[in-house]
Amino acid sequence: MANAERSGRPTEAFGATAVGGNRARLRVACLGLWLIVAALAARQVSVVLGSPRGERLTDLETWVGPNGVLHVTGSLYDSTRFTGTPFGGLVLKPLTRAAEQALGWGWTFGTLLLVVALGMVAARALPQPVGRRTALLAAPVAIGLLMLSLPVRNTLWLGQTSIIPVLLVLLGCFAAHGQRTSGLLIGVAAALQPTLLLFAPLLWLTGRRRAALCTGVTFAACTALAWAAMPHDSHTYWVHHMAGAGLGGRADDLGNQSLHGALLRLGLNGPLEAALFLTLGAAVAASALRRAVRYFGDGQLLLAVAVTGCAAIVVSPAAWQHQLLWVLLAVVGRAGRRASDRYVWPVAVVLVMTLPARMLLPDMPSLDPLRTNLVLLAALAAATAVPFLSRTSPYYQSPIPTEYAPTTPARFRHIPLVPFLRRVLTRPNLLLELLLIRVTYAAYSQVRLAATGGSISAGRAEAEENGRQILGLERALRLDIEHWANHTVVRIDWLRNFSDFYYESFHFAAPLTVLALLYWRRPADYRWARSALGLATLLALVGFWLYPLAPPRLMPTLGYIDTVHGVQDFSQPDYGTLTALTNQYAAMPSLHFGWSLWCGVVIAVLARQWWIKALGTLHPLFTGSAIVVTANHWVLDAVGGALAVGAGFGLVYVLTGPRTSTADPHRASRAAKASTGRSTSSV
């Protein structure tokens, strides 16, 4: 009544307006997502069809070429490039003319339509009931993730048919009318990819026994038909190559993300490897089926299908990249009781399935077993280990909520600009944080290297010209102390050694140490500091891109001495192997100084003891001196780094407001009580 008296409109009108506004925003979001999907599809088509003829659709070329599958008079497997089953070759052979005419545009667009159909079926298979937002956004999100995934991109690039078995299984599980039709579709999928026969026991154990029998009969009939038509090829595939092992490449190749390939890469071979593979494969299959049956009974049929598909990847003799789509479907599983843990599994799956392994794990020999088997480990985790929540769990719909600090008033009316970025008191999930930090650093390294056109020599002339500009500006400002400082330190051995050590040792160690301590002791402040560091680094990348700059040590004829890396061979376009590590012209702004200044600011603000604050302020001072005396940066580079860090802290303040601990607790308490009072009075 009070609302009606003040505005002249009834309360219901406000509710209707709010509902209408939410629907409009949902429609806009849905339209935006579909536009993104269309852009991704256009990008994939342009990348594939814009490549030279001999470099794209190479697998499809082998099928329709002069001696390809569709024309060959001998064995399909005279060349190991054909990786399909004999039944797949039998299906392809009658399509000679159609396949040749569809090569290129038709085949690529047909594959895109299959991807769209797969995403639509997966979106409709989500456990019911689903909200309006999920119903509208699930399909474009699913199709977008599929477009970005490495298996789909690899399938489009090679001209493979590996999407068809996945789509047939999903159609058999979620769209087919009747158990016979369901079993027929899954049986044909298994005839194209034999390890999908693992779905037959899933159907049997979940009470769909007629579908399970039909799956087995269809698989046997298709395989027998191919054996009768092509006995030599069938013997080659099923006996000599052990259901496809070694086709498309060596079985121990990094592209084979199956348990068999991993054991071979670990150095096992012969009867011992075969016995271990069969034993572990049987254990994985049994565990995965037990979990899948449980999820099926819980109403999570899509998750049950994804778990079974992941097990099929693990137990397959050969699972190439274009056959690994089942792992992405496992993203529908919910794991974690806390809200902050809920995103760990889906983010990890999306990263593993969309980014190269070298971006997720550093190139270190000790991490080779993990990096080379990353997709296999994700499939193995989904099939046997990840504790997906049951729909009957109280945490399935309502995880333990995140603790937020009370809203802190800012000095300016429009701050924070993003009100929903509230101050979180609990620490973020460590695995998710490590994943995001690693991916961010890998992207930073790639952008830094590409800032001069993808090679160091591409921007050499521009970087040296910019170096002369910086030196001229410093001379005008009377800041050109680099040459004097460099040659002075070179004469003092202990000072030179200390400067070189400090330059090389603390650039990464200090920020990582500060982040680790904040994560453990001050989780709320960790988010504030981490965000400021990330924004400062992002701004620095813009500087690297727009203004490539040669440091003093890479300026010919100026007489600087590179105390850290040694004498440079200026006659070489890339100055030797040193520049193969990173972009040596990414000097403005200096992140060596910027990150050290970030450490100093964070320590000075958060430390309680005065002597710790003093040590924190010494770190940027020592770093600034080291980068100048070693001839790795100009003085103005340090100024640029300071500006980037200052802008990073400023953006965090503008976007999220002041830190909780800096606000007046009495003001915050009064604001919270006032807000509670207003809520009570309106009720």
Image: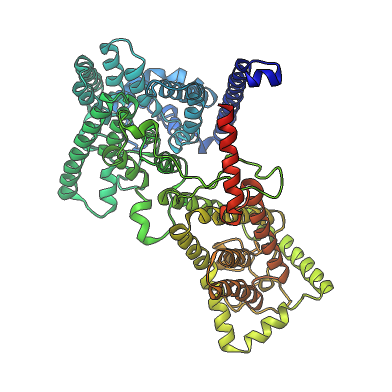
Please name the colour scheme applied to the rendered image.
rainbow
Q: How many marks?
A: 0
Residue farthest along the right direction in this orientation: 476
* Residue 670 x, y percent position in the rendering: 60, 46
Q: Quadrant of residue 381?
A: top left
The one nearer the camera, 225 or 543, is 543
> Is 502 drawn above or below residue 458 in the view shown?
below
For residue 515, above or below residue 162: below
Give coordinates of residue 622: x percent, y percent: 60, 76
On screen, residue 368 versus residue 245, left or right, reads: right
Viewer can see residue 454: no
Residue in the foreground of this view, choosing between 342 and 411: 411
Q: Nearer the viewer, residue 131 or 662?
A: 662
Indicate the quadrant where residue 160 lies. Answer: top left
Q: Is 305 situated above or below 655?
A: above
Q: Is residue 460 above or below residue 431?
A: below
Visible residue check, residue 367: yes
The answer to which image quadrant residue 396 occupies is: top left
Q: Residue at x 59, y 48 (%)?
A: 668
Q: Position of residue 95 (x, y in %)?
A: 41, 18
